[in-house]
Amino acid sequence: MGRSTLQPIQPQVDLRLARRWLDFCVQEHWRRCQGSKKRVIDLMVIDCENRVIVPLPARGNYVTLSYVWGNHPEQERSSLQESSLPVPLPQTIEDAITVTKGLGYNYLWVDKYCIDQRKEDFHTKLRQMDVIYENSVLTIIAAAGSHSSYGLAGISKIRKSCSTQRLKSLPFLVADELRKSVWASRAWTFQEGLLSTRRLIFTEKQMYFECQGLYCFE
Ligand SMILES: [Zn+2]
């Protein structure tokens, strides 16, 4: 589905394009890309429309985020308002909410906000992390930057429009760009990103989609 004629990369991502890739996969690859059928008990997710943390409704689909928290300061969440999100949110999380909505979904799972770090829930959810990623409809991979205030290139972070730097449709070039990223240098983030059957990857230069049967780029 990649276009054969090279066009300059636009400063901002067209999320309708990513949605077309994802919808195609959901409709056509239902067997190989549907992911795991294991259940995660009491999964909490961000309700992107209402900006609160809620239990995932039965049969609700959700998106996951793989990113590097980095040196962004910890934000205290009031114990009285456990369902609320901090204001302001780190930019990468804010952008992931924009992407989730742009893809036509409403629930987003982000480890920092969807695991209660003070309870035994923390260890239980850590053990279930692989299934949480496997079950998600797609994982957004924030491959650029080294901290959670960096944002996603092409969403809040304006990219340089440049046709000459545009990468070709060769997966190994993407793999090479990914390998050099801080995201990939953290063993765990690299692993979790590969657990989902569908991945939407934001590098500094371009957005890519890959699933078990398709590879697309802007
Ligand atoms: Zn697919």
Image: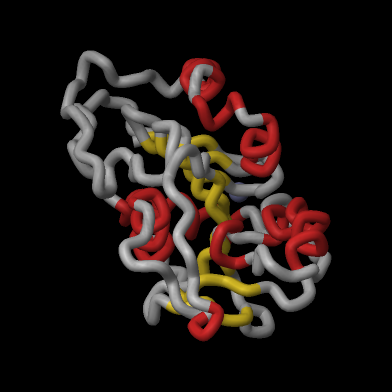
Q: Which quarter of the rendered picture does the C terminus lie within?
A: top left
**From the image, which quarter does the N terminus lie in?**
top left
In the image, 55: left or right of 6?
right
Instruction: Look at the image and name its color scheme.
Output: secondary structure
Residue 60: percent from the left, percent from the top?
A: 61, 77
User: Would you place residue 168 above or below residue 217 in this image?
Assistant: above
Q: Residue 15's x, y, as percent?
A: 32, 53
Q: Nearer the viewer, residue 125 or 169?
A: 125
The residue lying toward the viewer, choosing from 119 and 64, is: 119
In the image, residue 53 sits, relative to residue 143, either above or below, namely below
Quarter residue 194 falls in:
top right
Q: Identify the residue at image location x=68%, y=30%.
A: 187
Task: Residue 159: give x, y in percent of width and height.
Answer: 22, 33
Left/right placement of residue 28 relative to residue 165 reads right
Residue 19 seen in the current view: no
Q: Position of residue 108 (x, y in %)?
A: 52, 65
The residue located at (52%, 35%) in the rendering is 215
Q: Is residue 8 visible?
A: yes
